[in-house]
Image (spheres, grey):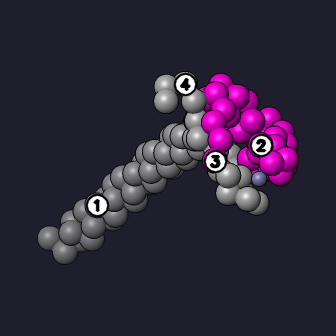
Amino acid sequence: MDGLAKETCLTCYVQFWITKEHQKHLEETKKVYHCPNGHGQRYTGEADTQKIIRLKQDLKSAKNREERAKRSNYALRGVITKMKKKESARDGKVQSKTV
Ligand SMILES: [Zn+2]
């Protein structure tokens, strides 16, 4: 059925239909709704819109971590290059002594 979502009561297992809009609203608001037999229930999980927001935040912080790692890596390469230059200059001195 287009535009409708099947719900199953958690208490009596009766199946009933609500509009997808209403279901989305119930997922987002976590409001209590009732089956045709009057059993109250509500969504407790993360709604799709909340999931999207959370995943966007996760992606943003992952990108920030990647950027920090790149900067740190760049700085370390600079230190290594400096040390190599120092070392080769020292080796140069040692070689000139032995010649
Ligand atoms: Zn019920």
Asked if marks 1 and 4 touch (Cβ < 8 Å), the reply is no
Residue 52 figure quarter: top right
Q: Secondary structure at mark 2?
A: loop
The reply to whether the residue tagged 2 has its Cβ within 8 angstroms of ligand 1 is: yes
- Image coordinates of residue 41 in percent, x first then y, are 80, 50
Asked if marks 1 and 2 touch (Cβ < 8 Å), the reply is no
Circle nearer the viewer, 4 or 3: 3
Asked whether residue 21 is drawn in magenta, I would say yes
Q: Give the class, few, some or many, for how many residues have Cα within 10 Å of label 4's Cα (few <14, many ≥20).
A: few
Residue 10 figure quarter: bottom right
Amino acid on which disc 4 is placed = Gly
Q: Which residues are magenta?
A: 15-44
The residue indicated by pointer 4 is: 3
Q: Give the class, few, some or many, for how many residues have Cα within 10 Å of label 2's Cα (few <14, many ≥20).
A: few
- Comes first in the chain, label 1 or label 2: 2
- Comes first in the chain, label 1 or label 4: 4
Q: Secondary structure at mark 3?
A: strand
The residue that appears at 55% across and 24% down in the rendered structure is 3
Residue 15: numbered disc: 3
Q: Secondary structure at mark 4?
A: loop
The residue indicated by pointer 2 is: 36
The residue indicated by pointer 1 is: 88
Q: Nearer the viewer, residue 19 or 69?
A: 19
Asked whether residue 80 is drawn in magenta, I would say no
Q: What's the distance in space between the residues labelled 4 and 3, CA to CA?
A: 16 Å
The residue that appears at 77% across and 45% down in the rendered structure is 35
